[in-house]
């Protein structure tokens, strides 16, 4: 297990959060720590266990690959950790997993000036928007240290032993969209000012990590349903958006077959608009639902005029997928609002027009929920 290492996830003035790789066959883990002595710091730490000083056992029954040690004393001091796998049936390993350099607590000054944890929100297909706030200097004034020089952003997979890697060494804004988030374990992000302040010799400490975020994906069932889209894009207003970014993670997709020439449609559409805007303003229900317009208008000009009153997605009028989707849900009359299970593409409400528009009820109707 020499290639396995404990990594530091976060440090404060009195706590250290560490993580280590999972070990095949392990039912639990034994975690130990000890203060780093000055004599040990002068020696080589290639053994990755911090020397031979006495360790204190934190737990012999950890069932996860991450732990936080609180109530550590002396801000700025350093500590070693080591962990070994264990089996409930006996035959525990005597090989420890360690790290090459001691982990240190933040000093009170480092804690005082470091930035708050960023937020990370799933956005589209296997992507997330990461946002952070400028650290305001004590006593007011214009922003924190390094504000004008940008920010360094790092990320890690939320998996045992995964370390931090730099997304960008210098970002000028206070948000970024990160793509290709493929891990089902999710990801964490942290940030700090990119520049070293003129009155300091080392870079600022990183912020605490964000809560883990899992990139949403378009289900295989929905991919098959929309495979007829020639270029794989839908409309949102006048702009094109990929099917993945538009529908990934949607719990329910409502296919709305309608036309401007249809009187009952013109009566129902404003009701649907009000409901859609209401549900989109609420969380988490807002991210659970998307509406997709399937035009039954006689020409593209009528489609564009009617669609301009709608706040949701639409299949392009000239796309063969529009008629294919209407055939799939067997449209024989309009208005028609067909509720699909976003996980499978299966129909769970044949026509929601005139019925309660209740996400909770749809969850009860969806198989496996």
Image (cartoon, rainbow, N blue to C red):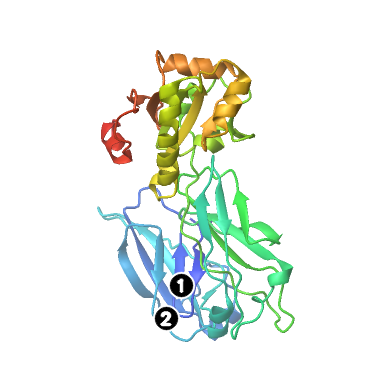
Q: Provide the secondary structure element on which disc 2 rests.
A: loop
Which labelled disc corresponds to residue 16? 1
> What residue is shown with label 2?
72
Find out whether the residues at labels 2 and 1 contact each other: C-beta distance under 8 Å: yes
Residue placed most toward the observer, 216 or 202: 216
Q: In whole angstroms, how far apart are the C-alphas of marks 2 and 1?
A: 8 Å
Q: Provide the secondary structure element on which disc 1 rests.
A: strand
As drawn, is 149 to the left or to the right of 282? right
Q: Is residue 1 above or below residue 240?
A: below
Where residue 12 sits: x, y (%)? 49, 76
Q: Is residue 228 above or below residue 164?
A: above
Local packing at callout 1 (Cα closer than 10 Å; few below 14, some 14-19, many 20+) is many
Where residue 167 sits: x, y (%)? 64, 55
Work out whether mark 2 precedes mark 1 in sequence or the reverse, and give the earlier one: 1
Residue shown at 47% from the left, 48% from the top: 214
Where residue 100 sits: x, y (%)? 56, 68
Residue shown at 50% from the left, 15% from the top: 324
Residue placed most toward the observer, 350 or 106: 350
As drawn, is 324 to the left or to the right of 282? right
Q: Is residue 99 above or below residue 234?
A: below
Residue placed most toward the observer, 193 or 160: 193
Residue shown at 27% from the left, 37% from the top: 361
Q: Is residue 94 visible?
A: no
């Amino acid at each position: 297990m020499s290639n396995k290492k404990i990594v530091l996830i976060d440090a404060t003035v009195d706590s250290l959060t560490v993580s280590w790789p999972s070990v095949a066959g392990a039912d639990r883990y034994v975690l130990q720590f000890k203060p780093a002595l000055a004599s040990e710091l002068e020696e080589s730490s290639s053994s990755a266990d911090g020397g031979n000083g006495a360790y204190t056992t934190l737990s012999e029954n950890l069932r996860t690959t991450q732990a936080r040690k609180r109530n550590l004393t002396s801000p700025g001091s350093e500590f070693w950790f080591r962990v070994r796998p264990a089996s409930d049936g006996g035959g525990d390993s005597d090989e420890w997993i360690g790290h090459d350099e001691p982990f240190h607590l933040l000093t009170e000054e480092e804690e005082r000036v470091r930035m708050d944890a960023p937020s990370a929100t799933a956005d589209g297909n296997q992507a997330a928007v990461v946002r952070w706030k400028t650290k305001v200097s004590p006593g007011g004034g214009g922003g924190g240290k390094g504000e004008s020089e940008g920010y360094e952003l790092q990320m890690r997979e939320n998996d045992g032993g995964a370390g931090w890697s730099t997304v960008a060494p210098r970002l000028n804004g206070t948000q970024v969209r990160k793509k290709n988030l493929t891990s089902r374990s999710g990801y964490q992000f942290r940030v700090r000012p990119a520049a070293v302040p003129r009155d300091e010799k080392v870079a600022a400490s990183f912020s605490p990590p964000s809560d883990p975020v899992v990139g949403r994906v378009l289900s295989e069932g929905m991919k098959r349903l929309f495979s007829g889209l020639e270029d794989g894009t839908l409309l949102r207003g006048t702009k094109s958006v990929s099917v993945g970014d538009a529908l990934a993670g949607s719990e329910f997709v409502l296919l709305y077959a309608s036309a401007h020439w249809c009187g009952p449609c013109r009566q129902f559409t404003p009701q649907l608009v009000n409901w859609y805007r209401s549900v989109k303003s609420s969380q988490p229900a807002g991210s659970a639902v998307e509406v997709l317009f399937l035009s039954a208008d006689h020409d593209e000009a009528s489609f564009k005029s009617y669609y301009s009153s709608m706040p949701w997605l639409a299949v392009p009028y000239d796309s063969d997928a529009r008629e294919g989707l209407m055939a799939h849900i067997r449209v024989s009359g309009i208005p028609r609002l067909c509720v699909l299970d976003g996980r499978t593409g299966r129909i769970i409400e044949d026509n929601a027009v005139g019925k309660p528009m209740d996400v909770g009820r749809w969850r009860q109707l969806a198989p496996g929920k």
